[in-house]
Amino acid sequence: MSAIDKTKTQLLLQGSILLLLSFPILPFAVRSIAMGVWVFAAILYLILNRKEIKFEKKKIPQLIIITLPFLLLAFSLLYTENQKRGGDLIVRILPLILCPVLFYLCRNLLTERLLKIGKTIFVLATFSIVAYSFIQTFNHFDYLNRPFSDIEYQYNGLTPETITKEKEAEIKYRRFKVFIEETSGTHSTYLGIYILFSLFLIGEFLFDKKQKIGLKILATILGISMFAWLAYISVRAPLLAFLASALFVLILKVRKPKFILGTMVSALLIGFLLYQIVPNLQLRVNEVIENKLSIPESGNDPLLFNSTNVRLGSLYCSTEVFKSNWLLGVGAGDVQDKLDQCYDEKIGAIIYTWDTYNNHNQYLFFATATGIIGLLSFIGMMIYLIVLSVKRNHGTAIFFLSSSAILFLTENVLVRSDGIMYFAVIGYFLLFFKSEKK
């Protein structure tokens, strides 16, 4: 093959990576096509450059640690009963093994310039969803605040005479979330995750002394807009993950106690102010405080259920399933069936029959699917990746991985396309890109 063919292949590979990083605005079908193009380009690049590609034996333990959680899930297909569901899951999470392996083998093309362009694309893709969601909300303001229908009263076990202001706000917030998810095609939690990482990238950009003032002003406008939307949609886990991980990076990178203390106090004051002025956020925080770590009670009364206690019920049943199958788990295909059985037999709340409720915890997903071995492999992988990013002193990777570790406590991120693309594409790009020595 000529040098021109190799150059074209390199451009195709890098272009497909940038396309993957625009995944927040890509429909699911287009994501699959983009992933297929990237895999094809990566394989073609490896064939054309097979003489130049060096595989370091010392990297084998690293790749084993990174890919072991996926391999254990795949192995669990041998003993799981619901083979179809398990097989569908393995296909959906293939990026967990494709991204680390192919990014490692093609690491010579993962330049800082490509990373900078990729960051910009991701931020703009996220902002486009925020802008579209805001416009749709503004245009449908009257629709979102319309009087409650008889069906809504019945669904919530209320009447016009018995509804309280708190319950009214809760129903309107739920109506708003459903509207946003249906119009944007993105679950509010995952939109919150995209925003939290975009805000960190914008912060990095603003602290870069080489950037032009005009671009910094534009970045500031984008950042304020996205933070305001993050507060308005009031997704709790991304907000907490953003604050905790940003503080973690400051402690590691800045190491100035007064600055860190000032940042902490400022964050607390901003949080308190947001709690006071954003009704949706106040509603969500109060729900956690008032719930007192209780799981849903058995019965059919909708007033017994809220987002917090339903999640706690998922954690309770995940723990019960794990205790009964602690060594190897129930297999990738049977986790949901076992959870549903627990919801029915040990909790008995009708809300768990209205929809599918997964573990709501990534660590417990691996525990229930692949037992203690899978749980330890996943925790070990996360610890290894965070330690590695700290040793490299790479702030972006530290923030990304530490925030992901926190998000995994409340979300089963890696079973949805949004979560898989976010963690696998961005995370392993950050791990294997070539840092330019200064």
Image (cartoon, rainbow, N blue to C red):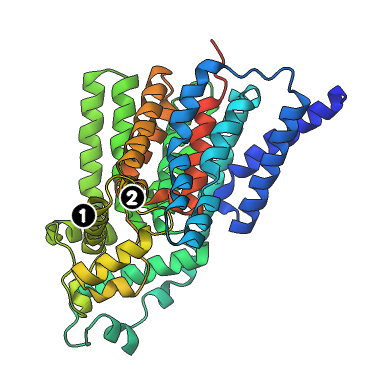
Identify which residue, 219 or 353, lies in the foreground: 353
State the residue at coordinates (47%, 42%).
70
Asked where in the image residue 280 lies, by quadrant, the reply is bottom left
Report whether 427 appears left or right of 5: left
Mark 1 lies on residue = 276
Residue 225 visible (yes or no): no
Could you say whether the residue bearing mark 1 is in a helix, strand or loop?
A: helix
Q: Residue furthest front?
A: 79
Question: Whole-percent x and y of residue 394?
Answer: 44, 23
Q: Is residue 380 above or below residue 198?
A: above
Q: Answer whether residue 346 is visible to the viewer in this image.
A: yes
Taking the spot 21% from the left edge, 40% from the top edge, the residue there is 268
Examine the rendered structure and indicate whether residue 245 appears above or below residue 322: above
Query: In which quadrant of the rendered image does the N terminus lie?
Result: top right
Q: Nearer the viewer, residue 160 or 333?
A: 333
Query: CA gap, disc 2 to disc 1?
Result: 44 Å
Q: Which residue is mark 2?
A: 329
Q: Nearer the viewer, residue 19 or 361?
A: 361
Q: Which mark is residue 427?
A: none
| Residue at (33, 50) in percent of width and height | 329
Q: Is residue 146 left or right of residue 279?
A: right
CB contact under 8 Å: marks 2 and 1: no
Badge 2 marks a residue whose secondary structure is loop
Locate residue 404, reporting x and y percent: 38, 40
Name the kind of residue labelled 1 in the image.
Gln
Dividing the picture into quarters, in which one does residue 337 lie? bottom left
Residue lying at the far right in this picture: please name it. Answer: 2
Q: Residue at x 67, y 51 (%)?
A: 33
